[in-house]
Image (tube, rainbow, N blue to C red):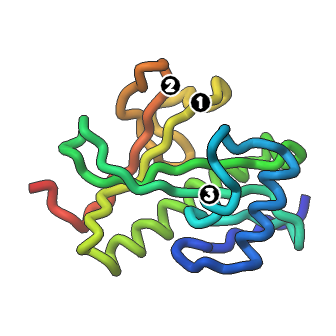
Amino acid sequence: MGKIKYVSGWRKRDGKLERDAIALWKEHGVLPAGVTPESRAREICCLAYDGNRLAGISTVDIQPYRPLLNKRFGFLRVFTAPEFEQQEIAIGLAVEGRRILEEWSIANPEEQLFGMAAVYQSPKLGRYPVGKSGLTLAGFTPEGHQLRIAWFNHLPLF
C-alpha cells in the first residue's frame, strides 16, 4: 500500500469520482437492495485512493436526528475495498469527512448541519467511547449498533 490520498467529492457531482465509486460498489455488490449505485454516488463525501486505485468511499445522507433535538446530522457510510481493510482507511475517511462537512456547514449555515454521525455495524469497531476518528458514542440503535457523533461548534443549539 502506498500513501493514501483523500479526495473530496462532496456536492461536486464529479463524473470521474462517481464512475470510480460505482465501479467499486458494483465489483463488490455492497449496496443494499433498492439502492442504485448512481443514486448513492450523489451522496459521495470523500474517496480514498492508493495511487490510481480506489481503496475506499464515504457517502453522507443528511437527516434530522430526533433524540438530539431533531438537529440535522450528516450520517456517514464507509466502504473499504476488502484488500484495504484493517489499514485505517475507514478512519481516514471519517476524519476527512468530518473536516469536509464542517467546512461546508460553516460556508452554508442556512443548511443547519450540526454535525456528523455514523452507525457502527461492524463488531470490529467501537471498542472505546471516543474513537480515533473523533466520533463519540452517543447511544445505540434499536438493533444494538453504536451511534457515534461529532458536533460542529459553529451553530448554537438554541
Question: How dense is the environment of label 3, judged by Cα within 10 Å: few (below 14), some, or many (20 and up)?
Answer: some
Q: Quadrant of the N terminus?
A: bottom right
Residue picked out by circle 1 = 121
Q: Amino acid at mark 2?
A: His
**Which one is earlier in the sequence, the residue at label 2 or at label 3?**
3
Residue picked out by circle 2 = 145
- Measured in 3D between alpha carbons, the distance from the residue under mark 1 to the one under mark 3, in whole angstroms, is 19 Å
**Place of residue 47 in the rendered image (x, y in percent of width and height, measured from the top left):** 69, 65
Q: Amino acid at mark 1?
A: Gln
- Of residue 146 and residue 3, the one placed in the foreground of this image is 146
Tell me: 66 left or right of 100. left
Residue 50: tell me if it is visible: yes
Whether label 2 touches label 1, CB < 8 Å: yes
- Measured in 3D between alpha carbons, the distance from the residue under mark 2 to the one under mark 3, in whole angstroms, is 22 Å
Residue picked out by circle 3 = 40
Q: Residue at x 70, y 56 (%)?
A: 37
Query: Is residue 33 placed above or below 51 in the rendered structure?
Result: above
From the viewer's perspective, is the residue at label 2 or at label 3 nearer? 3
Q: Residue at x 48, y 60 (%)?
A: 98
List the single residue furthest toward the left: 158
**Which one is earlier in the sequence, the residue at label 2 or at label 1?**
1
Tell me: 84 left or right of 128. right
Q: Quadrant of the C terminus?
A: bottom left
Q: Amino acid at mark 3?
A: Arg
Query: Is residue 102 placed above or below 116 in the rendered structure?
Result: below
**Which one is earlier in the sequence, the residue at label 1 or at label 3?**
3
Q: State the SS at label 3.
A: helix
Q: Residue at x 51, y 29 (%)?
A: 128
Whether label 1 touches label 3, CB < 8 Å: no
- Measured in 3D between alpha carbons, the distance from the residue under mark 2 to the one under mark 1, in whole angstroms, is 6 Å
Q: State the SS at label 2.
A: loop
